[in-house]
Image: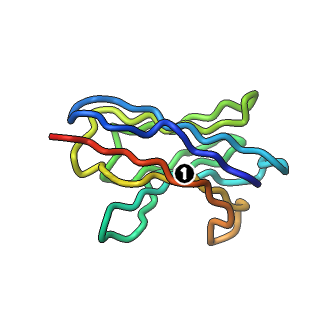
Amino acid sequence: VQLQASGGGLVQAGDSLRLSCAASGRSIDTYVMGWFRQAPGNDRELVGSALWSGGTIYYADSVKGRFTISRDHAKKRVYLQMNMLKPEDTAVYYCAAKRRYEKNYDYWGQGTQVTVSS
């Protein structure tokens, strides 16, 4: 599975941004797609995740109510819609994939920088 993330940029606090993750290669029907982020000096954290085929979507408490994950099966893309952005959302964002019952994410896209100015 190859993943390509895009959509990062520099925005002001309160703005919105949508990240996109394009998946290619083998079928991801039974995969979990995740969005992670890593700020300088911090560990990588899971922002949210969703089973590609549908169902409940998980969000970290820090983004719940502001970020939304969606899937476009036809385009084989996963999106992270980020609203009401805060300076503390500044990080490099990554999309990742893992088989449904695996613990670790095996496939990673390159990061995309999101910078939120106050």
Q: How far across and down, in percent of the image, does residue 112 sit?
A: 47, 48
Q: Quadrant of residue 105?
A: bottom right
Q: Quadrant of residue 101?
A: bottom right
Q: Which residue is depicted at the point 38% across and 71% down?
A: 43
Q: How far across and down, in percent of the image, does residue 56 sit?
A: 56, 45
Mark 1 lies on residue: 49
Q: Name the quarter where the N terminus is drawn.
A: bottom right
Vertical comparison of 53 with 58: above or below:
above
Q: How far across and down, in percent of the image, does residue 54 sit?
A: 66, 40
Q: Which residue is depicted at the point 64% across and 46% down?
A: 4
Q: Name the quarter where the C terminus is drawn.
A: top left
Vertical comparison of 93 with 6: above or below:
below
Q: Which residue is at the far right?
A: 26
Q: Looking at this view, is 60 or 16 the one in front?
A: 16
Q: Is residue 6 left or right of residue 43?
A: right
Q: Secondary structure at mark 1?
A: strand
Q: How far across and down, in percent of the image, does residue 24 sit?
A: 77, 45
The kind of residue on which mark 1 rests is: Ser
Q: How many marks?
A: 1
Q: Quadrant of residue 83?
A: top left
Q: Which residue is at the far left?
A: 118
